[in-house]
Image (cartoon, helix red, strand yellow):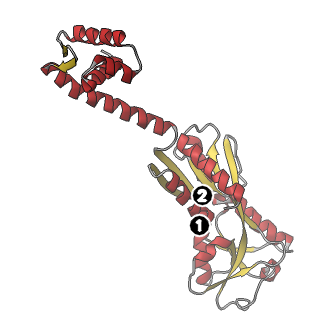
């Protein structure tokens, strides 16, 4: 017994007529009658009583009709589910976020746009740092990740640049320059800088140090913050000053102020990373949407 037999049987049962069923199926009536006889021989029982003007189900045929409909419906559901998964409309995307990238408005906007387009896909977030996220992409425990380039080792990874946000000086509220406007980095030459460990964000760390050196000084480093978003609270506690991505201004902690940087300022780039050989349709759809939004600046 195959699915074709069941489809032919259901058509005859519902039409109660072999010729109408053949028209519905788009085949000739003799081949249809032959297929039904083959099914009856396989089962060893008659399924229809042939009448002068049609056909009616036997008791066994009525039972088979219920079973056949259920099987065909299950097959259609299975086919739809497989096709939907192949299109990336169902499944899961494991997303990594590095270095407070989730504070950048583009990122939650992209997440919301993806969830609207693919509501049946489960998004599972993971926060870490760029080196750890790149390793997770390589070993397959993550599908995509928002990272801060450049990468120390980007082999096997595709990067889609999304944005380069400006950085801001963050000072204690009682600092002598707290009430000023934009400041050059050189005005901080005598201050203690609070940065995160270089190992968790080498690209951004090196960018900050290089910007200070271009301004004419090498920063004096003090207390390290465990992560980028922690810097703000250490500044508020009086441990020193710092430079942070502009999107961290969303952290409105008491006792701090943010100031624009005058002149040549460091930038905080964010890229979307995916393993080059990742064939997940859900992850590829996410990458395609990110590429569209990065391209039109939305």
Q: Which mark is residue 142?
A: none
Q: Is residue 158 left or right of residue 9?
A: right
Task: State the separation of the CA atoms marked 1 and 2.
Answer: 8 Å
Q: Is residue 128 visible?
A: no
Residue 58 or residue 201, whichever sits in front: 58
Which class describes the residues within 10 Å of circle 1: few (<14), some (14-19), or many (20+)? Answer: some
Q: Position of residue 104 (x, y in %)?
A: 62, 66
Eyeballing the image, is 279 above or below 265?
Answer: above
Asked if marks 1 and 2 touch (Cβ < 8 Å), the reply is: yes
**Helix, strand or loop under label 2:** loop
**Residue at image x 82%, y 79%?**
186
The residue nearer to you, when weighing 287 against 78, is 78
Q: Is residue 120 left or right of residue 51?
A: right
Q: Position of residue 11 (x, y in %)?
A: 30, 24
Q: Which mark is residue 129?
A: 2
| Residue 217 horizontal/vertical position (percent) | 83, 74
Q: Quadrant of residue 219?
A: bottom right
The quarter in which the N terminus is drawn is top left
Query: In the image, 38: left or right of 172?
Result: left
Dot 1 falls on a residue whose secondary structure is loop
At which x and y percent is residue 298?
A: 66, 62
Front-lying residue, 166 or 19: 19
Q: How many marks?
A: 2
The residue where tag 1 is placed is 227
Above or below residue 167? Residue 129 is above
Residue 16 visible in the shown view: yes
Residue occupying the point 35% across, 13% down:
29
Number of residues whose C-alpha sits closer than 10 Å to that of mark 2, classed few (under 14), some (14–19) or many (20 or more): many
Res 203 quadrant in image: bottom right
């Amino acid at each position: 017994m195959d699915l074709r037999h069941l489809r032919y049987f259901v058509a005859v049962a519902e039409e109660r007529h072999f010729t109408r069923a053949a028209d519905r199926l788009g085949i000739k009536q003799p081949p249809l009658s032959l297929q039904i006889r083959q099914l009856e021989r396989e089962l060893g029982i008659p399924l229809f009583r042939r009448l002068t003007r049609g056909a009616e189900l036997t008791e066994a045929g009525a039972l088979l009709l219920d079973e056949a409909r259920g099987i065909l419906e299950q097959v259609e559901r299975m086919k739809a589910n497989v096709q939907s998964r192949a299109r990336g409309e169902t499944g899961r995307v494991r997303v990594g976020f590095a270095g407070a990238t989730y504070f950048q408005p583009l990122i939650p906007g992209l997440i919301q746009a993806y969830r609207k387009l693919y509501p049946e896909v489960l998004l599972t977030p993971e926060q870490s740092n760029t080196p750890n996220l790149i390793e997770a992409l390589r070993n397959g425990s993550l599908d995509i990740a928002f990272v801060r380039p450049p990468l120390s080792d980007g082999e096997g990874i595709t990067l889609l640049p999304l944005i380069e946000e400006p950085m801001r000086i963050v000072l204690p509220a009682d600092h002598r320059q707290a009430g000023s406007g934009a400041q050059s980095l050189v005005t901080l030459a005598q201050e203690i800088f609070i940065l995160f460990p270089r190992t968790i964000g080498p690209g951004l760390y090196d960018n900050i140090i290089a910007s200070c050196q271009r301004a004419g000084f090498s920063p004096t480093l003090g207390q390290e913050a465990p992560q980028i978003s922690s810097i703000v609270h250490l500044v508020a506690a009086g441990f020193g000053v710092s430079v942070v991505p502009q999107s961290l201004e969303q952290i409105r902690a008491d006792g701090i102020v943010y100031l624009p940087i005058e002149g040549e300022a460091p930038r905080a780039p964010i890229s979307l990373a995916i393993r080059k050989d990742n064939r997940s349709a859900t992850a590829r759809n996410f990458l395609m949407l990110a590429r569209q939004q990065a391209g039109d600046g939305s």
